Amino acid sequence: MKVRCEVSGWLHLCLLLRAGYSHRVTAHTWTPPLRVISIVALVSLSACTPSGGATTSSAAPTATTRAERSTTTLASTTTTVQEASQAIPPIPLSTAELESLPGRIAINSDQRQAVSVVAPDLSTLVLAETAGEFAAQATWSPDGEMVAFARVASNGGASVVVTAVTDGSSVEYLTPFRVFYIQWRPDGGALGVLGAGGQGTALVIIELDGGKVTPMHSAGSFYFHWSPDGSTLITHLDSSILELVDVATGERTRIETETGSFEAPQWTSDGESVVYVRPFVIQSAGIAASQVTMDQLVMRSVASDDETVLAEDLGITSFSLSPDGNSVGYTTGTDRELRVVDLATGNRQDAVSATVFVWQWSPDSQKILVMGLEDGGLALSVWDAGAVTEYFTALPTGPFLNRYLIFWGQYDRSMTLWAPDSSAFVFPASDRGDDFIFLQRLADEFPVLVAPGAVANFSPSSA
């Protein structure tokens, strides 16, 4: 059974505009739209950047250990969302009590500019909640023991705060700009962060041990992914340039000067190759000679430059390797169908034929969470070995839509909506004009309300 929140088809406009966005910070508060005209304001605001140029800095970290933190326990009963209007029917919730979670969940509350972590036992650790300050972009470390988030103080000073969720101790690293994207190095020892600066979007590397903050370079639009050993970045700049960046020296090696329509490139799990989209021109001969450009999904060896074409479809716009590295999923820009290719055999499955907005592999590499476009919002379903189970249709929260989903090609590399054991997923949705975090267990028919909040993501481990 699917539950539908009836809203105009505003997400179709998002799909058309999404490919043209670059990373830009959004500092506004947004009210979920009940009419299609509201998306005009949303699109305008999502392209805003803060005023003022970036400056370079290598300031040492400031220790901000918090010995005493208030730990509360969420009520173990399902909360009823009160109706404020008949425009959107409420999302039905499970009648079962929320007794535990299959992992930790980091939650960002846009109204209070707060960041908190809910543990499996439902206790809550508040990481940031200060009047007049901004805290967002909560991102888990690879081992699930720390959360990094962007902070802007009341005096305008920008930083990244890294907090240990076991004891609440934290360290603050001053940054030359307001950070709007964070990606951990695979070993958890450093962060790559993006913010407004230079030519538009600038990259800084933060070494956690010693606190060194190193400005790298900038571009109009900037997407990146760490290699598995953490020594090299693959970057996609200005929607056209692909480079390998030696993190230690800053040396940049250009490997493509024209790319297809996509956001973030990706390393293979063995660190030997990178995957990206490039244009391919088909030239026909004869009297009616013509040429057609289509996008190819390719896997390129870093050492030898040998290439394997994984898919040839017009307008590929998103792709992702499964966590085990055995498969790659991708959607096409023409019909937005989701397809899965086995890298060993080359066999392809047409996984989901509906219009797919964004999607994400489960940690066990067996399932894919699909968010499909419907007039009522995003229809959430799960693909599992050829079968698709439909869950609920919801309106995503404003911050989740215009700060995350619009740039999902990049966020898919650094955060997950899936529980560590692949048994459930978390989703931020608006209902009656308020923002809530819902947990959908795959075995249940309806979601469970976890807490108020605008953005949420699961930790990589269940401890």
Image (tube, grey):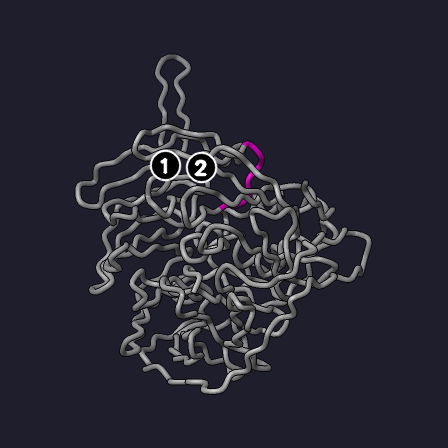
Q: Nearer the viewer, residue 442 or 127?
A: 442
Q: Which residues are magenta?
A: 353-359
Q: Amino acid at mark 2?
A: Ile
Q: Nearer the viewer, residue 180 or 357?
A: 357
Asked whether residue 163 appears in the rendered view, the answer is no
Disc 2 crowd rating (10 Å Cα; few below 14, some 14-19, many 20+) is many
Whether residue 29 is in magenta: the answer is no
Residue placed under numbered mark 1 in the picture: 297
Q: Secondary structure at mark 2?
A: strand
Q: Position of residue 293 (x, y in %)?
A: 40, 30
Q: Position of residue 176 (x, y in %)?
A: 39, 75
Q: Position of residue 388 (x, y in %)?
A: 55, 36
Quarter occupied by the C terminus:
bottom left
The residue under the point 36% across, 13% down is 286
Residue placed under numbered mark 2 in the picture: 316
Q: Amino acid at mark 1?
A: Leu
261 on left or right of 441: left
